Amino acid sequence: MAVNRGLKEDEEEFVYRISTAEEWEELRTSGATFGGDLDKSTACFHLSKLDQVQATLKNFFMNVNEDLYLLQIDAKKLGNGLIYEAADESNVFPHFYGPSRSFSPLPLDVVTKSEKLTNVDGPFNRGPIWPALLSP
């Protein structure tokens, strides 16, 4: 269920994407990506707000045995293709559908920062971009 469209005053300036190394490389080299299997099958990119990133990593990526990248995305650049949807009664997640809700690739120019994450026998380790991001 969509709760609102586009960026509103009370919504995040940035949203975050957890990408595999393969997806991040595709985005960097070709300038765009259609994402992973889940994104393609649902015709939208699954994103997180900053305060949701750690839970998203724990719930969906703890068993991933490859490097991941955390991408900071300028929400304003996603325009009306950014939809905030309720996942349950207490969680609203951002999804990028593309212009006019027509699934389109995520362009590189919306990414403002990237950070390599590694999962070494437990919590994800991160570099200096967001020092407190993954703190418990």
Image (spheres, rainbow, N blue to C red):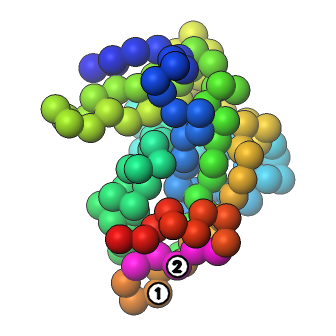
Task: Give the main secondary structure of the magenta stretch.
Answer: loop
Give the quadrant of residue 61: bottom left
Few, some or many residues within 10 Å of mark 2 (<14, 14–19, 20+): few
In this view, 30 is above or below 76? below
User: Looking at the image, which residue sits at the far bottom?
Assistant: 121
**Distance from the alpha carbon under mark 2 to that under mark 1:** 7 Å
CB of mark 2 within 8 Å of CB of mark 1? yes
Instruction: Provide residue 41's location: percent of width, then percent of height.
Output: 42, 37
Q: Earlier in the sequence, mark 2 or mark 1?
A: 1
Give the quadrant of residue 33: top right
- Label 1 sits on a secondary structure element that is loop
**Amino acid type of the residue that numbered disc 1 sits on in the rendered structure:** Val
Q: Is residue 116 magenta?
A: no
As rendered, which of 86 and 29 lies closer to the eye? 86
The structure residue drawn at horizontal position 26% and vertical position 38%, both measured from the top left corner, is 91
In this view, 83 is above or below 53? above
> In the image, which residues are magenta?
123-127
Few, some or many residues within 10 Å of mark 1 (<14, 14–19, 20+): few
**Amino acid type of the residue that numbered disc 2 sits on in the rendered structure:** Asn
Instruction: Provide residue 21's location: percent of width, then percent of height.
Output: 64, 66
The structure residue drawn at horizontal position 32% and vertical position 33%, both measured from the top left corner, is 92
Q: Which residue is labeled 2 in the image? A: 125
20 relative to 94 in the view: left or right: right
Q: Which residue is labeled 1 in the image? A: 120
| Residue 65 seen in the current view | no
As rendered, which of 21 and 17 lies closer to the eye? 17
- Label 2 sits on a secondary structure element that is strand
The structure residue drawn at horizontal position 67% and vertical position 36%, both measured from the top left corner, is 74
The structure residue drawn at horizontal position 52% and vertical position 79%, both measured from the top left corner, is 125
